[in-house]
Amino acid sequence: MRPLGVTRIAVAGCILLDLLRVAQVGMVDVLFQTFGDGGLSKKQDPAWVLDDWIGAVAAGPTAFWTTICCMVLTMLGVGTRPAMLLGILAYAQLGHGYPPGDRAIDRILRLVLFALLFTNAHRVFALDNRILKRAPVLTTPQWAYDLLKYFIALVYICAGVGKIMKQPMWLGFPKFPPLYRIVTDPLAGHLDPSFWVDFTWLFTAGSWFTIVWEIGAFVILTRLGRWWALGGAFMHVGIALTMELGMFSWGMLALYPILWAGWVSAGLDRLKR
């Protein structure tokens, strides 16, 4: 149960920091308004209903700051379930308001928060327990935990299959391996292509490892899942160091307490002692 509580806090924290970065650079009003209203979005998704409810100018900031407030409450564990539900809806509205900015990681984290609604993740590490003078709940329905593991496995397997389907050279011997071209891309990569061009064999091996590891994500559903997750953590930290992909790596790592449930619980026990 406690690993799901940690996941709740970590997921909400990633969303919160990601959105605060948008506010820091002053892009809230720009991203979530159409051209005609002084914004950047060419045409919002038809599911962007807030325009009709409160007007085009107020819709974006309202959804944005509602999501911010709900993520803070979710992290603190105050009115957690209503905050999570409202936060999911407001966060989804932001995606409809500016579809190009609604990344896969945004959708993944929304789905995880939605799944957590059906667990007791709101009853652990929560200020509500102190405010309402109630004891933490340390158990939760097993099906929800298993569903989350299945979902994580599906995300990685689909990522691996998608790479092979779109670009079979992930498992080939190209002069410039896909991984090399990704991490040296001037738009997102941090590595100097002229320096690393003599070490492309490393990126060939890395490309193979990425595919094998992603397609092998079915291991998550076995007792070896925690060990598979060590490779995942290594990969995501590497992505964070070599590329600029926003909260992608940290958002995925926020799900790893689910995969490391036994280790997380044991670590919390030792910390408590």
Image (tube, rainbow, N blue to C red):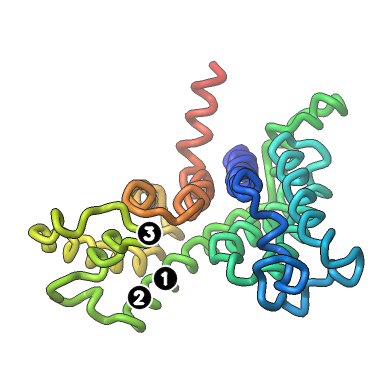
Q: Is residue 143 visible?
A: no
Q: Which residue is mark 2?
A: 163
Q: Amino acid at mark 3?
A: Ala
Asked where in the image residue 1 lies, by quadrant, the reply is top right
Q: Residues within 10 Å of mark 1 (few under 14, many from 20)?
A: some
* Disc 3 to disc 1, C-alpha distance: 19 Å
* Of 212 and 251, the residue lying toward us: 251
* Disc 2 to disc 3, C-alpha distance: 18 Å
Q: Amino acid at mark 2?
A: Lys
Q: First in sequence: mark 2 or mark 3?
A: 2
Residue 38 in the image: state x and y as whole percent: 73, 66
Asked where in the image residue 24 lies, by quadrant, the reply is top right
Q: Spot the residue most to the top.
A: 273
Q: Which residue is mark 1?
A: 159
Residue 215 in the image: state x and y as whole percent: 35, 69
Q: Is residue 265 visible?
A: yes
Asked where in the image residue 177 lies, by quadrant, the reply is bottom left
